[in-house]
Amino acid sequence: MKVRNSNIEILRVIFMFLILVNHVYGHGSGLNLKWIYSLGSEWDTAWNLALDSLCKLGVTGFIFISGYFGIRTTKKSLAHILLIPFFYTLILSIAFKHLGFHEIINLIFAFNGWWFVSCYVFIMLLSPFIEEGIKKIKGRIFLIIVMGMLVYTYVMNSLGKVDSHDIILLLTVYMTARYLKLYPQSCIASKMRMGGVYAFVLIALIPVAIEQIGWNTDKLMPYVFQNNNILLLIADYWIIYNFDKHAIYNRYINKISAGSLSIYLVTDYPDVRDFLDP
């Protein structure tokens, strides 16, 4: 049985906390992106914009880990991912006294309340077909498929200012991560690792620089302040690759990591979010 690298498990927790902080900025401001952008115009508040930009590493990083190591879809794992949202919806519905007919019916489709979980379930269902397909095609064909997905998600959608929160984004990240794990010596993999640290720095600095310059801020900012910013993918690969190179094992860390999804489920529940984020 393969032992889980505790370094990667630590990353899962970190990425989930980044998602939480990103929600605090977004939902705490009432999804007022213009106000969040404006934090970068003054030096004493610019760190908020830089931090919020870095927090977008969380969504990409969490699904990148799943793609990098692959998802083993079994009856147990599928039941687990479906029952966890059901459990938390039930507990939180009781806690916040939402026990009407509509809420009880929603328990059946609990994972639909959290977009990330519903997309993750979809990828879990696809993963056996993905793995079989990868075995049957050559690396060059795999690269062409991945490049096509990258162009659609990180070029076409980015130019359209589409801040992706959907299955297309997560599936693109998952497939890219699978390719980079299986072909670490490929040209694209080596180039991404070389640019990783620069991407990490640019994610924090570019939004602040745009605000400091103050030129066409409303037009420029949506191109960089989005989940499908290619810099996020590059930086997350660099982080995960380096964490994976130095494997450690700590069963306590791994147990804590097993509950990382719970951070997202609880803090993104509407009543908790309304209380916590402001």
Image: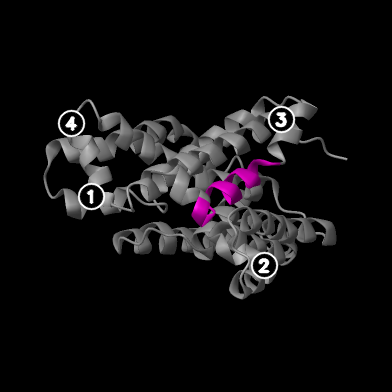
Which range is magenta? 259-271
Relative side of 218 to 49, left or right: left
Q: Residue furthest front?
A: 97
Task: Give the residue pinned by disc 2.
Answer: 107
Q: Give the quadrant of residue 164.
A: bottom left
Of callouts 4 and 3, the N-terminal one: 3
Mark 1: which secondary structure? helix
Foreground: disc 4 or disc 2: 2
- Does the image show residue 13? yes
Q: In front of the other: label 3 or label 1?
A: 1
Residue at x 62% of width, y 52% of height:
95
Three-letter code, disc 2? Leu
Q: Which residue is mark 4?
A: 42
Question: Considering only order in the chain, which callout, 1 or 4, is on the residue closer to the N terminus?
Answer: 1
Q: Residue at x 82, y 59 (%)?
A: 74
Which mark, residue 170?
Answer: none
Q: Which mark is residue 34?
A: 1
Q: How is the image coloured?
A: one colour
Does 277 sit left or right of 218 as displayed? right
Question: At numbered mark 2, what does the secondary structure look like: helix, strand or loop?
Answer: helix
* Label 3: element kind: helix
Q: Which residue is mark 3?
A: 6
The mark closer to the camera, 2 or 1, is 2
Q: Residues within 10 Å of mark 3 (few under 14, many from 20)?
A: many
